[in-house]
Amino acid sequence: MNPVILFCPVKILLQHSEQEWLNVLGNHSLIYSDIAGKTALHQQFPTLIESFRLYPDFNESALVEIDALAAARALGTHTVIALAEVDLLRVARIKDRLNGLRTRHEAMTLLYRDKFLMKQKLAAHGIRINPMAVVGSACEINDFIERYGYPVVVKPRDGRGSGGVRVLRDIYNLRDYLQQQDGTTLHNLMVEKYLDAPLLNVNGLYIDGNPVIISPVRSTVTCLDFLDGQSLGFQMLAQSNPLHAQSVKLTRRIIEQALPNLGNLLFHLEVFLDGDDLIVCEIACRLGGCSVNQELTLAYGLNPRLTLIDAERGGKSASLKSLLPQRHLLGQLNVPPRTGKLIDFPTSIDLPFIRYCSVTAQKGADYSGMRMTNGEIVSAIVEGNSEKEVSDHLMQLDSWVRDTFIWS
């Protein structure tokens, strides 16, 4: 099988063992990531040290993609993979050039990155979205508000991790937002009507255009609430819940009919539950953050990330054709840092319903809250026999963490 050019954040790399990466990547593969994680990566993956290509400010480095393109050509491989949103378009550009610009990977992937183009496409297929518009000035934001009223959401068209997202609830919010801008022309922004409704996430995996995992979960708070300091929980919907079937049907309509066929695909869909209707917020061709990959692995018996890589290389996973059943009903809790110094916390979380736990908090560290939705200090997965039991376990865990972590 071909070697792999893998773009992957340090955080995702560290969620897997060295043997898992060796098994799925094979020989001569290269891993592109951030030099800030060099010490942790070399400690956890001593056998893979020669495979790493680490860059300062990796997410923003324009140099990475031409280096990776040259490496792919030297290795004679077309297997270039991104596991995080920030890398999707540069990997797509590389794949187009490896195919002599005869493919449209960048154009197709853009519909999963540019939220305005994405939702235009969905609306054209009769899929419900909120009113929206591209905005390039204060007057254009004000035009939208005059038409649709407050509240509205202003955000980057290609944002990630809820970065740069602002909810404007009144004229005072609008004036404050505009005063923070560094010019009179606003770039790469869109505005849409804010919907105060429960949020559902759907994560999963397609292989060769066929759905293998489609997992709807109910969110306990919004991503913006998470950034403001509330714990973010996800509770899997039982297959007996009618909302499960409704979510799966919408997901398949989006991926299989409205948007381009990307073949092998990880995805993360966000939808609002407005009464009995599902309204699409956005979809991305990567998994959700936090511990979604671990959650899906435990619930469905298949590791989505590693399965995708194996399928891209032409391994046994490429033959997967049908949806997997849900084996376990799980929930996930992600606890953000407070603003202050973390003095102490227990070395382990001894609660009987926990199936996975990652604590990235550091004793003695000063925290100032979160800027993006990937800065949690505790991420854990719990199990239950019903949706209610999972919900109860999430609340018990949240209380336990907040009672035992000592802050100043």
Image (cartoon, helix red, strand yellow):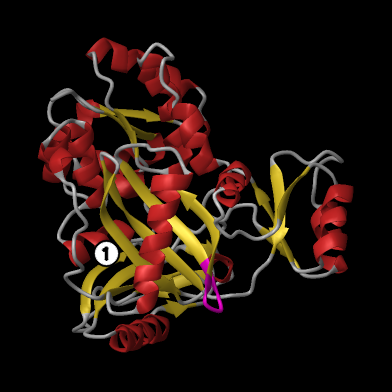
Was residue 274 drawn as part of the magenta stretch in this picture? yes
User: Which residue is depicted at the point 53% across and 49% down?
Assistant: 160
**Residue 179's spot in the image, x, y percent?**
85, 53
Q: Compared with residue 10, is residue 28 higher up or lower down, i.e. above or below?
A: above
Q: Is residue 165 or residue 32 the one in the foreground?
A: 165
Q: Is residue 318 left or right of residue 124?
A: left
Q: Is residue 292 or residue 354 the one in the foreground?
A: 292
Q: In this view, does 315 lie to the left or right of 206?
A: left
User: Which residue is depicted at the point 24% across and 51% down?
Assistant: 304
User: Which residue is depicted at the point 73% across and 49% down?
Assistant: 133
Q: Compared with residue 355, is residue 80 higher up or lower down, i.e. above or below?
A: above
**Residue 364's spot in the image, x, y percent?**
43, 66
Which residue bears the numbered disc 1?
A: 295
What segment is highlighted magenta in the picture?
A: 272-277
**Residue 129's spot in the image, x, y percent?**
61, 59
User: Which residue is depicted at the point 52% across and 24% down?
Assistant: 62
Q: In which quarter of the image is residue 328?
A: bottom left
Q: Quadrant of residue 95?
A: top left
Q: Is residue 229 or residue 1 the one in the foreground?
A: 1
Q: Is residue 361 visible?
A: no
Which amino acid lies under the numbered mark 1 shown in the image of this protein?
Glu
Q: Look at the numbered disc 1 and give the secondary structure of its residue.
A: helix
Q: Is residue 3 or residue 116 the one in the foreground?
A: 116
Q: Quadrant of the N terminus?
A: top left
Q: Callout 1 environment at 10 Å: few (<14), some (14 to 19), or many (20+)? A: many
Q: In this view, does 228 lie to the left or right of 291?
A: right
Q: In this view, does 106 lie to the left or right of 176?
A: left
Q: Quadrant of residue 359?
A: bottom left
Determine the main secondary structure of the stretch shown in magenta: strand
**Residue 381's spot in the image, x, y percent?**
28, 71
Was residue 370 drawn as part of the magenta stretch in this picture? no
Q: Can residue 155 be seen in this view?
A: yes
